[in-house]
Structures are given as C-alpha cells and as structure tokens.
C-alpha cells in the first residue's frame, strides 16, 4: 500500500486524552492509536472493562469523538444499533468501532460478536487483549495463556497457574468467513495503524485483535510495555496475520525465535513456571507455526 | 490540533443543577494526572525528531510543535516508555 500511515502523517489530534489508565498501560495506547487513525467520524462503543473505566469518569470525559459504554456482553450488538441508527438519521462518514477487552470479547461478548459477523454488519470490532479480566483485579479469561497466574488461576505446588491454552479468537472469527480479520500488537504500531486503516474501508464486518500488555496484570515495570509486546512476537507466542477473501496470510515470518524462557520469566505472572511448563508452551508454539507455514500464505508483503 | 482540554467545573449546588444522566460533552477534562508522576521526561538536544516517542506514548502527551516536541506535563504519568523507545537516548528521566 502506497499511502502508509506513519508517525509523521497521522493526525495530531488526540481522541483519548487525560485518561486514568495506569502508567504505561498498553490498552490505552491501542485505543489512542485506533482512534487517531479513524478520526472524528469514529463512534466508539466500549463495554465494561479498563478502557471504559478509565475513559469515562463523569464529568471527566476523555474521548473527544462520540463514545458510549455498552453492557459487558453487548459491544457488538450496540455497534449494530449505532451503525443502523447513524445511517438512518443521515450521518455521513462515520465508523462504528468497538473497543473491547479480551474477556468482553472472547467470553461474555462472543455471542453478540458472532451474530454481528453473521449479519455482516458494517462495523469494526477491535479487541485489545491484555490476557485477563484486568479491571476487576486480574481474573482468568478465555484469552489468558497456559501457565499464567491470575487470582482465579493461582500457582501452587500442584497446579502452576492457568491449565488451559489461550483460545484462538482470530481463527474463530475468521471461521465465520468474515470480510477482514487481523492480528496486531502495540509492539508494532506501524502494522496496527495500517490494519485499522484497511479495516475501516471494508464494507461489512472487520475484526482486529491487538495484543496490549498490562504492566499490573503481567507483572512488569511500567516502562516495559512495548518491549514485552515485541518479545512476545519475537519468541513466536504471537504472530501478525490477516484473513481476507477466505485466505490466511502471515505478515511476518521470523527466521528464528528468541528465547521463550526469557519472555516468560521476565513477567511476574509466569515466574513460577518450571522447565516442563515452558516445554509445553514451546511445543504448542512449534505446532502452531508448523501449521501456519504449511497452510497459510507466507509471502511477506508490506500492508 | 484538536484534543480534550481542561476546563473549570462547577460542582452542582442544588438539585436542579444535577444533570439527568451521565451523558455529557465529549473531551471535557476536569482533573490533571501530573500528580501520578515520580519522574519527568526531558527531551534533550540529541533528538532527531523521529517521532517514535510521540507515537508510542500511551497518554499522547508528546506534542508536535513548530519548534520540535513539547510535553504536556499536566497529563504525563512518567511511565518512561518514551525514554525506552527513543533510538538516540535523547530523553532523560528526572526525579520530580
Ligand atoms: C454482566 C457483567 N458481569 C461482570 C461485570 C464486571 N466486570 C466489569 S469489567 C470486567 C472485566 C473486563 O475484562 P476485559 O474484558 O478483559 O477488559 P479489561 O478490564 O481487561 O480491559 C468485569 C468482569 C460487568 N460489568 N457486567
Ligand atoms: S489494570 Fe492494566 S489494562 Fe487496566 S488500566 Fe491498568 S494497566 Fe491498563
Ligand atoms: S524518540 Fe527520541 S529522537 Fe525520536 S523524536 Fe522522540 S526524543 Fe526525538
Ligand atoms: S513518560 Fe510516559 S506518559 Fe510521559 S511522555 Fe513519556 S511515554 Fe508519555
Ligand atoms: Mg482484559
């Protein structure tokens, strides 16, 4: 794509400003950047979760575009209504965009999301994935990875944190034959910005799944949010990909992975893992990448 | 540039001052975040204006101006992400 969005070309306007997210919060960076790409025509819907909690503290209101809080389960159904309503009253150049957490998306909100994709409503759904229910104090969600310690998956002598793997929501969404879905990470904003731009032009439902580390829940220093997001991709536990026209495409195909152990043990939530646990995660990673490289289009192209 | 701004806020005095709901004007800020900060980022002359700090600041408080970058210390939380992302080590964190 020739008209790449970069730090130089993106608008100076800020649509998510003065918010009360913790220092170094990855989710707030994802929301900030998404709205900068979409601009003032974005009508954003945020369910219960950190980003609504830190953005709307009446009378302190941090969104400068039209924004509303939905029920926890109802991000996608409210997007459907917002889109239909805005169209009915003749509003032009708007984009109904959902900004929902991993719990709000992969667990309680999955039915509404599935329904909206099934109707092919003209909406953009962005899931910022911090891998747990952070706003209520770090409980396991369907997107919490294997081995992670949360308040509902503690680590003890017998059980070492979460015993279930992370749901593959990107492929669950793609399995609806959605017009456009992508994974992203706040560790690579160039890729994220251009995926949002691309998704905003799609007619029909588009979905972006962006990893957004939470220093509090992950147990990392507040200045390491970006580094950890990058390490997660470098060690192969996250990948940048797209689904379009019925095809999966890998955007970056690393020649070798950095140490998965380094990635895990630099976070408080994984500190208790032993070598056998880390082996399980490494084996899951290797199986996933083998399948990706076998079945997906792996020609790396700039967006 | 357009962004939410700090404005004065009159606390409701009597019942009729209270709004009917919590819906209100977008981008209306009433409190600063500067008190959260232990360290303050300072952009030094080593800056080459690559804008990575501007892009990656979770709070969006690094502002582009005619004479380079400026920081809105009313809302900077001092996380230090800008210092870490800078390819030229041009940002120094100073204890408040
Ligand atoms: C129906 C319902 N159940 C539970 C809650 C309580 N609740 C509010 S936010 C939240 C956690 C949200 O987690 P996630 O969607 O991952 O977003 P995050 O807070 O991590 O940003 C929960 C459980 C609620 N508001 N509504
Ligand atoms: S708890 Fe985590 S996700 Fe929530 S505001 Fe704080 S850093 Fe962000
Ligand atoms: S990242 Fe460093 S060099 Fe780049 S604009 Fe910021 S201070 Fe300047
Ligand atoms: S310290 Fe954090 S909030 Fe302050 S300018 Fe740097 S990145 Fe932004
Ligand atoms: Mg979450």
Image: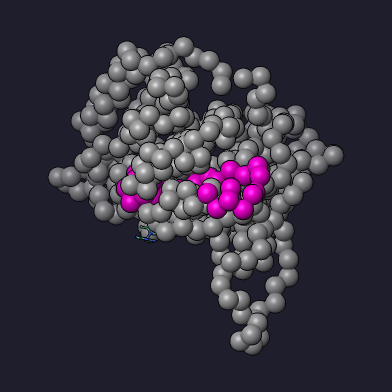
> Where does residue A207 sit, x and y in percent of width and height?
46, 36
Along the line of sight, the residue nearer the viewer: A291 or B51: A291
Q: How many marks?
A: 0
Residue A148 occupies quadrant: top left
Q: Position of residue A242 (x, y in %)?
A: 45, 25
Residue occupying the point 42% across, 14% down:
A298
Residue A234 percent across, percent down from the top left: 43, 25
Q: The magenta stretch spans which residues? A: A84-110
| Magenta segment includes A16 | no
B27 in relation to A76, above or below: below
Q: Is residue A203 visible?
A: yes
Residue at (51, 40) in percent of width and height:
A122
Quadrant location of the C terminus of chain B in the rendered image: bottom right
In the rendered view, does A56 fall on the left or right side of A40?
left
> Which quarter of the figure has residue A60?
bottom right
Residue A108 is inside the magenta segment: yes
Q: Is residue A232 visible?
A: no
Q: Residue furthest bottom?
A: B14
Position above or below: B44 against A255: below
Q: Which residue ends up furthest to the left in the rendered image?
A: A158
Tell me the residue at 23%/40% (across/down): A164
Q: Which residue extends farthest right?
A: B66
Name the residue nearer the viewer: A101 or A220: A101
A91 left or right, relative to A12? left
Give above or below for A176 relative to A69: above
Q: Residue at x 41, y 40 (%)?
A: A119
- Locate residue A179, reporting x and y percent: 45, 29
């Amino acid at each position: 794509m020739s008209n790449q969005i970069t730090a130089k070309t993106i608008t100076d306007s800020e649509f998510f400003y003065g918010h009360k997210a913790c220092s170094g919060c990855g989710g707030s960076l994802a929301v900030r950047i998404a709205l900068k790409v979409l601009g003032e025509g974005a009508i954003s819907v945020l369910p219960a979760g950190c980003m609504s909690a830190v953005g709307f503290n009446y009378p302190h209101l941090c969104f400068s575009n039209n924004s509303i809080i939905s029920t926890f389960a109802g991000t996608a159904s409210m997007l459907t209504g917002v889109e239909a309503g805005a169209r009915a009253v003749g509003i032009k150049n708007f984009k109904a965009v959902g900004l929902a957490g991993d719990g709000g998306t992969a667990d309680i909100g999955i039915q509404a999301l599935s329904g909206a994709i099934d109707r092919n409503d003209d909406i953009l759904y962005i899931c910022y994935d911090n891998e747990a229910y952070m706003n209520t104090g770090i409980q396991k969600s369907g997107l919490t990875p294997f081995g992670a310690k949360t308040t509902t998956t503690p680590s003890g002598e017998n059980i070492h944190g979460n015993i279930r793997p992370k749901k593959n929501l990107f492929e669950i969404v793609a399995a609806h034959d959605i017009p456009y879905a992508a994974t992203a990470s706040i560790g690579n904003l160039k890729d994220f910005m251009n995926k949002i731009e691309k998704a905003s032009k799609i007619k029909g439902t588009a979905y972006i799944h962006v990893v957004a580390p939470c220093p509090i829940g992950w147990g990392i220093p507040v200045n390491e949010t970006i580094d950890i997001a990058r390490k997660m991709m470098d060690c192969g536990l996250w990948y940048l990909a797209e689904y379009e026209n019925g095809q999966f495409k890998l955007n970056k195909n690393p020649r070798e992975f950095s140490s998965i152990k380094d990635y895990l043990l630099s976070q408080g939530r994984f500190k208790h893992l032993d070598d056998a646990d880390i082996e399980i995660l490494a084996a899951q990673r290797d199986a996933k990448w083998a399948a990706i490289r076998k079945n997906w289009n792996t020609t790396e192209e700039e967006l | 540039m357009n962004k939410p701004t700090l404005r004065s806020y009159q606390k409701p005095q009597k019942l009729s001052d209270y709004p009917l709901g919590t819906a209100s004007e977008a981008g209306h800020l009433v409190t600063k975040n500067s008190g959260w900060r232990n360290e303050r980022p300072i952009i030094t002359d080593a800056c080459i204006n690559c804008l990575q700090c501007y892009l990656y600041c979770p709070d969006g408080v690094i502002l582009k101006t005619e004479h380079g970058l400026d920081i809105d210390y009313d809302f900077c939380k001092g996380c230090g992400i800008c210092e870490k992302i800078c390819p030229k080590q041009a940002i120094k964190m100073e204890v408040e």
